[in-house]
Each structure stands twice: as structure tokens, then as C-alpha cells.
Amino acid sequence: DVCSSDLHLRDPRIGQLVDGALQFYHGKRYELCAWIVMPNHVHALFKVGDVPLGTIVGDLKEYTARETNKLLRRRGKLWADDYFDTFMRDAQHELRTRRYIENNPTKAFLVRNPKEWPWSSARFRGENGELHL
């Protein structure tokens, strides 16, 4: 979970940028299980391999901040310095977390169905719960 009070994620270009950046390294640096880009924060659930979590998050934040600043013709900090992470204890914990992440826009009354949110793994989720990227 990476948050900042000044993310500019309400701008569809930025939402698309962050969404694409999360998907880019799927199968290369991590296995992406679920994600959501909300107007003021991001959640991502992924399985790490050889690349440490801190490196993954740092690289994502660096790239998306640089590209966002280019798009918005601005300078300055985009993301909060730190991030919140949680170890998934078992498959049930992971499933609850995935549902929490993908249901964020419905809880915020932004959409009725999670699949309607344009920057979320829910739109790639099959009927059996599998992710089709």
C-alpha cells in the first residue's frame, strides 16, 4: 500500500500510467495477484521472487513519479516516503486481501461493480478467480 496526499491519481493519464507500470514487471520481477489505483492511493498484492520488495516498490515509485512529473510538467515529490506491507499468512488471507483491494472503488461509491474500475485487476479476473493478463 503506497499513499500520498498529492498523487494526482484522479487524472486518468496518471491512473493509466501507474496501472501499466504495475503490470509491466508481472512475470519478470514479481507475480502480480491484485492491484487497484484509487484517486488518492494504490494497493498491490504480488508474490516476490529474487528481487527484494523494497527494490520493487522503490523502482515503481521512482518511475511513476518521474513520468507523472513529465506529464504534469511539474517537479517534486509524488509518493509518500514509506509504504505499508503485510505478509500473507495463507491462501485465505491472500483471498481476503485480494477482495479488499478489488472492492475499494465499490466501497468508495465510485463504481457499482469492481470490474468497471479502469485501473484494477478486477477487470482481468475470470469467473473462477483466475487473473488473465
Image (cartoon, rainbow, N blue to C red):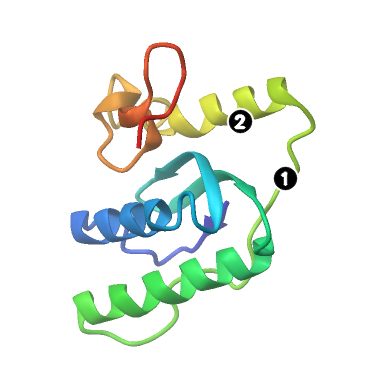
Q: Position of residue 22 (x, y in %)?
A: 42, 54
Q: Amino acid at mark 1?
A: Thr
Give the residue at mark 2: 97
* View extreme (top): residue: 127
Q: Residue at x 30, y 20 (%)?
A: 113
Q: Position of residue 60 (x, y in %)?
A: 47, 67
Q: Residues within 10 Å of mark 2 (few under 14, many from 20)?
A: some
- Say which quadrant the C terminus sits in: top left
Q: CA distance from mark 2 to mark 1?
A: 10 Å
Figure check: 104 above or below 17: above
Residue 53 picture quarter = bottom right
Figure check: 90 above or below 41: above
Give the residue at mark 1: 86
Determine the secondary structure under disc 2.
helix
Whether residue 75 is visible: yes
Question: Left or right of 25: which side holds 12?
Answer: left
* View extreme (right): residue: 89
Q: Residue at x 38, y 70 (%)?
A: 64
Mark 2 and mark 1 in contact? Answer it, CB < 8 Å: yes
Q: Residue at x 48, y 49 (%)?
A: 27
Going from N to C along the chain, the mark reached first, 2 or 1, is 1
Q: Position of residue 126 (x, y in %)?
A: 37, 19
Question: Left or right of 62: which side holds 11?
Answer: left
Q: Amino acid at mark 2?
A: Thr
Determine the secondary structure under disc 1.
loop
